[in-house]
Image: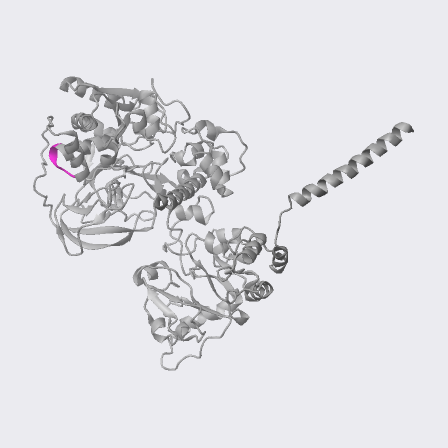
Amino acid sequence: MEVLLNTILTLCVLGVLSAVILYFVAQKFRVEEDPRIDEVEKMLPGANCGGCGFAGCRGMADALVKNDDISSLFCPVGGGDCMKAIAGYLGKAAAEKGPQVATVRCGGTCEKRPRTNEYNGVKSCAVASSLYAGETGCSFGCLGFGDCVKVCSFGAIAIDPATGLPVVDPDKCTACGACVKACPKLIIELRKKWPKNRAVYVSCVSKEKGAAVMKACKAGCIGCGKCAKVCAFEAITVENNLAFIDSQKCKLCRKCVNECPTGAIKLVGMDPLPKEPKAPAAPKPAAAPAAEKPAEK
Amino acid sequence: MKTFPIGGVHPSENKLSSAKPIEVLPLPEAVCIPLSQHIGAPAVAKVAKGDKVLTGQLIAEAGSFMSANIHSPISGTVTAVELVANGQGLRQPMITIKREGDEWVEGIDRSKTLVKECALSSQEIIAKIKEAGIVGMGGATFPTHVKLSVPPGKKAEALIINGVECEPYLTSDHRTMLERGEELVVGVTILMKAIGVDSAYIGIENNKPDAIEHLRRVIAEGGYKGVEVTPLRVKYPQGGEKQLIAAVTGRQVPPPPALPIDVGAVVCNASTTVAVYEAVQKNKPLIERVVTVTGKGVKEPKNLLTRMGTPITTLLDAAGGLPEDAGKVINGGPMMGRAMINFASPVTKGCSGITVMSGRDAERREASQCIKCAKCVSACPMGLEPYYLSKMTQKKNFDELEAQMITSCIECGCCQSTCPAYLPLLDWIRLGKQSVMGIIRARAAAAAPKK
């Protein structure tokens, strides 16, 4: 009995002693951390996707609290509203950025861009592009091995088996930019996200001359410049035989869609402009892929 | 018999064209000359569309020290200087020339007479080699003048001539050694003078006994002092620079950034040595080379003396056309070569052969799981762990790859060829090596301005 009592007492005294020592040590070595970091971290979406450039949301929260100027920081997942709320809480000016969505700029489906060779190496875009141009005649287009699919943490991108091209689900896409970095052909771009997922974009990145593009792919941009001429907002530039629509300047007027002779300008979520009576042949090929598009997405 | 100490494999040799004498391919109607046919900075074009050029005229100048001149292989008119798809379908700047006759630049000695004596100094020889645009013709295309310029503080002790040709199928070096042995040996004496050594070893694998015997006779009859033929036991990749040094001298080149010169060796390919002879003694720039066109399905495997820039299709036609069962056409040999998709692409300075693999040989077998048997580790001639490097590349663990010396991989393909699970080890390792080298370059660039 005595042994038991002694043991219990000794342990109790030891416990109290340790607690007192620990209390003073904790006081002495306490790390002062801004409590706002925790608050800001809670306000961030918590996706830990790395889209902001930091390893996770904690890193971003830390930077948001510590930096005086946070205009260069942006959480693509939370978007403008989230940034505004954080800026309001911290009393700083937030970056103004509208919502964005990843856009795959290649229209070279299996039927429009026939295969010229067969690749049987590692099924990875990074490996294939380090070896050669790809399975089709176009050295700029999508390789279709799905490196973008593998890096997406939100399940927002998938290869459509019918077309062999990646398709982005705009509702799931958070514009974190992981796929943009993963694509060795630089096909994926973050573009302005319109309501109802509407979009007009050039679905081609080929810098080849027109004749070479036509030979390799029926849906390629040939750099004819018709779209740039018709654009009233100076949103379209043609450089290196390739048209590019600036998504910040584009007003979705859809004039360029009807002008494009190869159907390289894609229209999503909207009906094409009514056909002009002057040129009945021209709008037809443009209208056909546009009609398919909403069903695909 | 000598060979390198670690790793290596012995693939089927398939030297189908070793008994075929070198044939001269008729001049092509048009050529396409890539500005980047060597390791280092691309050459800078000196001609524009519409210019008339002569055979042997300088058309592109070395872009930096680590670069090489390019000369016109035919005479005619420049039709374009633009981006053209190469063998892999990737666009590269190239000079296109349409042929008109065959007029040579003055001063080039085209006679066959052997010129033994060379009164030039070491610097003059290297300057002539640089002028002629000579690069390593075994496939690595390292500019030869850079290799011969021994950095201060280091000393070359021996010259090693690479007549190994360990790559299956290819026979261009073998035929060159047999048919141009005397020129080769004179080239060796010139190279010895250039780097200031008095001993040279010509390393030849013992599956080429005729070449060993022929060169030994040439050396004995001509009384060339210090030149010696070293027979080597057949093992791939003995033609790798570091493997050859280890096989001939027994010295191991330390991992990068160490170079062969750190163990006192300078290695030069056999065909390159003949090109050096022609450049120094005959003023002839590097405008043609021997290309082996071979493969089991090819009607007449051949060794063709080809002007640079000739389309691959012309060579295939000369060998009886592309066989019907062709599954893969490779620029180079089956171990180190690169599969091509564009046969209109040109022969370049590093193209030692065109190998056509028939349907079944060309196909890769389905990969299964790694069973950690470590066959790849035993096969790696650089002492690396290929299965681990491949895995780490897939995990994008570049720090670990760098620590595991991925940059010393010579991409010989022994690991992949020996893997019982048919894993695409080299595909991944190449990607990892490229990424790590990019990271190292970026780090060096970031560190440079601070100095």
| B284 in magenta | yes
Residue appearing at x 36%, y 36% in the figure: B336
Position in image of residue B193 (x %, y %): 18, 26
Front residue (pair B323, A207): A207
Residue ranking furthest to the left: B106
Occupied quadrant, residue B133: top left
Is any part of residue B239 visible from this angle?
no
Front residue (pair B41, A203): B41
- Is B118 located above or below residue B288 in the figure? above
Specify the segment rendered in magenta: B281-285
Q: In this view, does B287 lie to the left or right of A111?
A: left
Front residue (pair B138, A65): A65
Residue appearing at x 46%, y 44% in the figure: A122
Position in image of residue B149 (x %, y %): 23, 33
| A133 in magenta | no
Colour scheme in use: one colour
Main secondary structure found in the magenta portion = loop
Position in image of residue B302 (x %, y %): 25, 35
Is any part of residue A41 visible from this angle?
yes
- Is B429 located above or below residue A177 in the figure? above
- Is B25 located above or below residue B176 in the figure? below
Occupied quadrant, residue B125: top left
Front residue (pair B213, B358): B213
Position in image of residue A113 (x %, y %): 40, 58
Rendered-image quadrant of the N terminus of chain A: top right
Q: In this view, does B444 lie to the left or right of A14?
A: left
Residue ranking furthest to the right: A1
